[in-house]
Amino acid sequence: MTIQTVGIIGAGTMGNGIAQACAVSGINVVMVDISDAAVQKGLATVAGSLDRLIKKEKISAADKDAALARIKTSTSYDDLKAAQLVIEAATENYELKLKILKQVDALVGPEVLIASNTSSISITKLAAATSRADRFIGMHFFNPVPMMALVEIIRGLQTSDATHDAVKALAEALGKSPITVKNAPGFVVNRILVPMINEAFFVLAEGLATPEDIDAGMKLGCNQPIGPLALADMIGLDVCLAVMDVYLTEFGDSKYRPCPLLKEMVAAGRLGRKTGQGVYSY
Ligand SMILES: NC(=O)c1ccc[n+]([C@@H]2O[C@H](COP(=O)([O-])OP(=O)(O)OC[C@H]3O[C@@H](n4cnc5c(N)ncnc54)[C@H](O)[C@@H]3O)[C@@H](O)[C@H]2O)c1
C-alpha cells in the first residue's frame, strides 16, 4: 500500500511535528484536533519551524509554501476518511485514546491503517480495541519530530507483516531511520534510558559524586550529549518516576524500583526545568 495522505489526530507537540515531517516529504496531511484554536496553534508552530529552516538555508520559501499547502486542518474526524494511514497523537491518556480509536475505527475504510504515537500504552491492547488489530501498529516518533531521526515501529502481537512494511516504508520516505520493536513497556529506547536515569539518582543518593560530575562522567565517558540528571530535569522528574512505576508494576521485577531520592524530589515538587528546580536550579 502506498500512503499518500496521512491523518493525524492531535495538533500538539508531536502531532504538528509529524505533520511537518510528512508535508516537507510530499505527503498530504489532515491534522485534526478538538478546537480551531488547537489546530491553528499547531499550524502556526509548523510555519514557525519552517521559517527557521529557511533562515538556516535548509529549505526555500517556495518549499515552505508547498509544505503548508499540503496540510489541511480540521476539527471533524470525517476529514480523516481521505487518509490511508491515521496516526493518533492525542494526549497520553488510556481512556481518551480508546475513545478516539474506536471512533476512528468505525469511521474510516477497512483498508486504512491506524497507528498510535503513545509512549507508554500497550499497542497490543489498543489494537485489540479496534476491529482491525492486524492493521494497527505503534509509530513512536521522538521530540522534536522534524529533527530526530528515530521512529520506533512497534508491532503488537496482532500486527501483520504488510502493515509493518507499509509503515516502515513511510517512515523511510519521511527521511527517518526506523527500528522495529515488539510491544513491551517502554519499547526499546525508554526501557533503557529511564532505568539509566533512575540509576543516576541512586549514584547521587549514595553520595558517590556531585550531580555535575555524574553528568560529566556520562557525557565524557559515554559520549552522551547531555548527562542523565540534566536530562531528568528536561523530561520532568515526575514523568521519570511514573515510567519506573509502570515498569515495576508491569514486569513485577524489583530491578525497576524507583530511587527513593527521585520519589522525595517529586514529593517536594522539584520536577525539573518546568518548576524551576530539579537536580539543578533554573
Ligand atoms: N512530547 C513528547 O516528547 C513525546 C514523545 C513521544 C511520544 N509522545 C506521545 O505523543 C502523544 C501526544 O503527546 P504531545 O506531547 O504531542 O501532547 P500535547 O499535549 O502537546 O498534544 C496533545 C493534543 O491532543 C489534542 N487532543 C486531546 N483530545 C483530543 C481528541 N479527542 N481528538 C483530537 N485531538 C485531541 C489536544 O488538544 C492537544 O492539542 C502522547 O501519546 C505522548 O505520550 C510524546
Image (tube, rainbow, N blue to C red):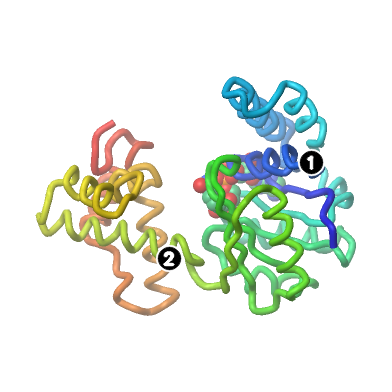
Q: Residues within 10 Å of mark 1 (few under 14, many from 20)?
A: some
**Vertically, is 30 above or below 40?**
below
* Label 1 SS: loop
**Vertically, is 267 above or below 252?**
above
**Vertically, is 220 above or below 273?**
below
* Location of residue 37 in the rendering, given as x and y in whole percent from the top left corner: 69, 30
Q: Which residue is mark 1?
A: 26
* Label 2 SS: helix
* Location of residue 237 in the rendering, given as x and y in whole percent from the top left corner: 34, 49
* Location of residue 64 in the rendering, given as x and y in whole percent from the top left corner: 73, 27
User: Residue at 89% of width from left, 49% of height from top?
Assistant: 82
Q: Which residue is mark 2?
A: 191
User: Residue at 76% of width from left, 30% of height from top?
Assistant: 68
Question: Looking at the rendering, in which quadrant would you find the C terminus?
Answer: top left
Going from N to C along the chain, the mark reached first, 1 or 2, is: 1
Direction from residue 260 to residue 55 in the image, left or right = right
Direction from residue 51 to residue 196 in the image, left or right = left
For ligand 1, tell me if the residue under mark 2 lies within 8 Å.
no
Direction from residue 205 to residue 151 in the image, left or right = right
Most foreground residue, 167 or 71: 167
* Location of residue 223 in the rendering, given as x and y in whole percent from the top left corner: 32, 50
> Which three-letter amino acid code belongs to the residue tagged 1?
Gly
